[in-house]
């Protein structure tokens, strides 16, 4: 085994603390497992906390799949100031009076309704979006020209949880550069957003502020869910250091795909990434989450699925009860073709 390779292949859910980058988390996981091949799905801003899917070993090939699902956030929108980063980490670039209507819950819900559904969004100036190989935040730090292109996103829901019209003190931006006479109360919305991949909550806050006739930024952000991975499935860094691979989750549950077991000659075909005729596979129903726990899968839950296979449908293939490959259906050939084969089968979690 090469240096820096642990022989492990597993998926983790990390509860990222604020103040750390997603790459910081990757480095911590590398240290815990003595494994260079560690990746994450769905970058979280340094100031944000919450769910960060992390893959170890050959399971890093799963990162692109795990970041595809819906994301749920708990956001605090602070009105009155706009910043370079669209959150409390940046410098104030705009400041404005907050209209009285922003404190009205009925108005807030109507405004949030305007921001639900499919729409175009301009990412923050400070983001990981790349253009010609350069990340936006790198260009911003060097004052390089960088054209942020709009992208299509979907906001599935935006639920107002609370309005604080006399909020004060937690966000230092409010009083930065102001005299004591100018310092006053703030208006804050606490909102739960369910959004598609690629959506920036910071941009939503910025655009909502402008639509309200003032300015706004994100004062706090926590991610509660990525696809089927919930915060309750995640562990902190100290817990991870204590339990190590026992923190592994079942990728079959997280993927939510139909699956099949491969044995004998069929297993060798899967390991080699060979095409497999559809009639050779007995598909099983996707594993279901129970109480938000993705760590353990029960064998008695195995149930055949007789539903017709659709074009390009993805399935998971198991060898020795480990995730060995992801295949896609080709209707013209009536066969499944390999999309991703894992050098080491991905563990299905502690106790599997």
Image: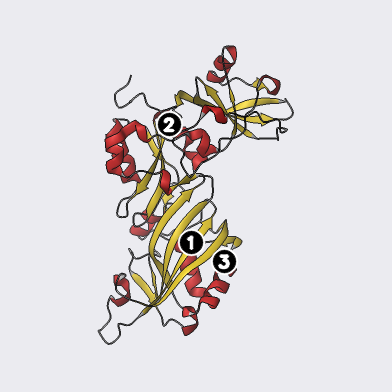
Element marked by disc 2: loop
How much space separates mark 3 and mark 1, taking CA atoms?
Answer: 13 Å
Residue 316 percent coordinates (x, y)? 57, 29
Q: Earlier in the sequence, mark 3 or mark 2?
A: 3
Q: Residue under circle 1?
A: 192
Question: Residue extending furthest right?
Answer: 332
Q: Residue under circle 3?
A: 115
| Residue visible at 44% across and 75% down in the picture | 215
Which quarter of the figure has residue 245? Answer: top left
What label sits on residue 349 in the rendered view? 2
How much space separates mark 1 and mark 2, taking CA atoms?
Answer: 30 Å
Which quarter of the figure has residue 53? Answer: top left
Q: Give the number of the mark in front: 3 or 1.
A: 1
Element marked by disc 3: loop
Q: Give the number of the mark in front: 3 or 2.
A: 2
Residue 243 percent coordinates (x, y)? 30, 34
| Residue visible at 37% across and 72% down in the picture | 93
Please, is residue 185 above or below residue 255 in the view?
below
Which quadrant does the N terminus fall into? top left
Contact between marks 3 and 2 (CB within 8 A): the answer is no
Return the residue nearer the eye: 301 or 195: 301
Element marked by disc 1: strand
The colour scheme of the drawn protein is secondary structure
| Residue visible at 29% across and 41% down in the picture | 239
């Amino acid at each position: 085994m090469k240096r820096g390779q642990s022989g492990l292949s597993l998926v983790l859910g990390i509860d990222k603390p604020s103040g750390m980058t997603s790459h910081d988390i990757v480095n911590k996981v590398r240290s815990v497992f003595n494994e260079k091949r560690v990746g994450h799905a769905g970058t979280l801003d340094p100031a944000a906390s919450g769910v960060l899917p992390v893959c170890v070993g050959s399971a890093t090939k799963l990162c692109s799949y795990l970041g595809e699902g819906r994301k749920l956030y708990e956001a605090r929108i602070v009105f009155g100031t706009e910043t370079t980063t669209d959150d409390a980490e940046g410098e104030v670039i705009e400041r404005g009076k907050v209209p009285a209507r922003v404190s009205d819950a009925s108005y807030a819900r109507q405004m949030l309704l305007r921001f639900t559904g499919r729409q175009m969004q301009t990412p923050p100036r400070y983001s990981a979006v790349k253009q010609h190989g350069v990340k936006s935040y790198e260009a911003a730090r060097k004052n390089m020209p960088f054209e942020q292109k709009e992208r299509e996103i979907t906001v599935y829901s935006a639920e107002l949880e609370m309005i604080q019209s006399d909020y004060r003190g937690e966000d230092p931006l409010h009083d930065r550069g102001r005299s004591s006479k100018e310092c006053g109360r703030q208006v804050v919305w606490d909102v739960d957003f369910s959004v598609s991949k690629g959506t920036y909550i910071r941009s939503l806050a910025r655009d909502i502020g402008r639509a309200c006739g003032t300015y706004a930024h994100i004062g706090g952000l926590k991610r509660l869910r990525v696809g089927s991975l919930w915060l309750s499935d995640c562990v902190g860094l100290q817990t991870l250091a204590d339990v190590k691979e026992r923190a592994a989750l079942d990728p079959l549950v997280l993927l939510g795909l139909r699956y099949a077991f491969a044995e004998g000659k069929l297993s060798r075909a899967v390991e080699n990434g060979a095409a497999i005729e559809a009639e050779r596979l007995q598909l099983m129903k996707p594993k279901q989450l129970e109480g938000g726990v993705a760590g353990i899968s029960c064998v008695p839950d195995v149930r055949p699925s007789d539903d017709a296979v659709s074009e390009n449908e993805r399935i998971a293939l198991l060898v020795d009860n480990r995730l060995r490959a992801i295949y896609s259906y080709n209707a013209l050939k009536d066969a499944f073709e390999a999309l991703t084969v894992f050098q080491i089968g991905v563990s299905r979690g502690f106790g599997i």
